[in-house]
Image (spheres, grey):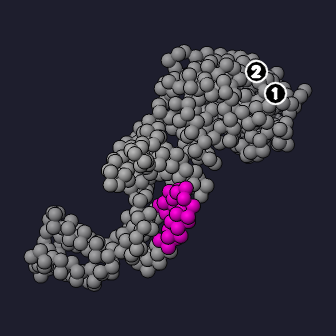
Amino acid sequence: MTTPQLPDLPIFRTIAAAAGALGQPAYVIGGYVRDLALGRPSKDIDVVTVGDGIALAQEVGRRLPGRGKVTVFKNFGTAMLPTQEAGEIEFVGARKESYRAESRKPEVETGTLEDDLARRDFTINALGLSLNPADFGALVDRYGGMQDLATQTIRTPLGPDVTFSDDPLRMMRAVRFASQLGFDIEPDTYDAIVRNKERIKIVSQERITTELNKIIESPLPSYGFKLLFQTGLLHLIFPKMAQLYGVEKVGKQTHKDNFYHTLQVLDNVAAAGGDLWLRWAAVLHDIAKPATKRYFPAQGWTFHGHEDKGARWVPGIFADMKLPQGEEMRMVQKLVRLHLRPIALVKETVTAAAVRRLLFEAGDDIDRLMLLCRADITSKDHERKARYLRNFGEVEEKLKEVEAQDHLRNFKPVITGEIIMEAFGLKPSKDVGELKNAVLEAILEGTIKNEMAEAWAFLLQQGAARGLRPEGTSFHSPV
């Protein structure tokens, strides 16, 4: 493992000069140093000074061309300074912390550099680089962080029971760093997570979800979820997902383990470049299978309706997780509800009507849906999987063909409810809804085009069948 080197940026020399003028030793500490050692890009620079962090930030700001604007957070004893060459730099005084059992918010007091390093979550985040003139750029590694980077190990600087009991969110962070970096959690550290997992209950849902999202966005998110499951954390923070685990058997008939299937789908979506919300759709696509699982001797295990029940659950899950309730949630809900539809088309003759209906319902999310459904083909039977993928390719080609011809993505029928009410002198009613739906179905089936002339003639025909006639001479056909 290569010793991290400070980039040759003037800002670091400016900080060193300012720290020297104030007589306050200063160091770059934490994730920025870790990422330098790993050769990873990093934009978060934290500067710790043995003294007043706010005063150091203000002194650095005074020395920058144009005088840098310092934002002070007095309650936290920190200051933020934006720079052109290194982005935002946070300044804080070295501190030590003590915790009460019922809270993860520490009582903070001024400390030494050793105190500050000891309070860090993991050894790989307790690395520092000196910004002092006498040893500028020298590595500070009190807890073997470089060795743990070399062995790809997540380990706490102090005893892990102390670290996790003090701040239980660090258990989630251990899993997150392991998942992001592909590292192992050191055995004693892992065992401490298992022992202290119940402490996660004092952490706010927002903080838990932030870490969970980072796990979901990992290169191989299944690794993080397996750690969450094996430590018991998943059962506490996301019980519905933990309930996917396991296989039931009646005679020789079993079903696949839906937990590991979900993780494979999630990994497939991640490998295809899916964003956070498409990955959430992968996590939730089979979430209602345990609730819909039934056994029938003639059929074996079934999960009928799991897509609809799962879609109904999505708003509640997003609310519980403190995830957005707007467009992102609605997109995930739609994908969960529709995720079987393209697969069903693979199994049968691909008709233009079925494709039109799918395009209409999926709208602008059709490409996301198809990516999710392709990721959902996880059969271990290689011949069967290859056959499904070939057939799936035919569905995708048909989708492109129908979309190019009919432009059905997010289309709106030319006949609206207002037109129907004006045409027949109706108020909002069951008749209006049924007529509107009849026009929509005719368009999707290809019986008529989504053009006013054909749709209007069809509407009059449907109205006549119900004993309705265009009302009055004042009404003018929209044709």
- Point out which mark residue 140 bears: 1
Residue picked out by circle 2: 113
What amino acid is labelled 2 in the image? Leu
Q: Residues within 10 Å of mark 1 (few under 14, many from 20)?
A: many
* Residue 138 sits inside the magenta stretch: no
Circle 2 or circle 1, nearest the eye:
1
| Image height of 247 relative to 390, above or below | above
Q: Which residues are magenta?
A: 368-396
- Residue 381, position as x, y percentages in the image: 54, 59
Residue at 73% from the left image edge and 46% from the top image edge: 41
Q: Quick one: label 2 or label 1, which is nearer the N terminus?
A: 2
Task: Name the magenta segment's main secondary structure.
Answer: helix
Q: Please state, as top left, top right, bottom left or bottom right, where the C terminus lies in the image.
A: bottom left
Horizontal side, residue 22 vs residue 187: left or right: right
Residue at 53% from the left image edge and 35% from the top image edge: 229
The answer to whether mark 2 and mark 1 are in CB contact below 8 A is yes
- Residue 177, position as x, y percentages in the image: 65, 37
Secondary structure at numbered mark 2: helix
Q: Please state, as top left, top right, bottom left or bottom right, where the N terminus lies in the image.
A: top right
Tell me, yes or no, if residue 329 can be seen here.
no
Residue at 24% from the left image edge and 70% from the top image edge: 436
Residue at 49% from the left image edge and 63% from the top image edge: 370
Quadrant of res 13: top right
| Image height of 470 relative to 305, above or below | below
- Residue 166, position as x, y percentages in the image: 58, 20
Horizontal side, residue 121 vs residue 16: left or right: left
Q: How many marks?
A: 2
Q: Residues within 10 Å of mark 2 (few under 14, many from 20)?
A: many
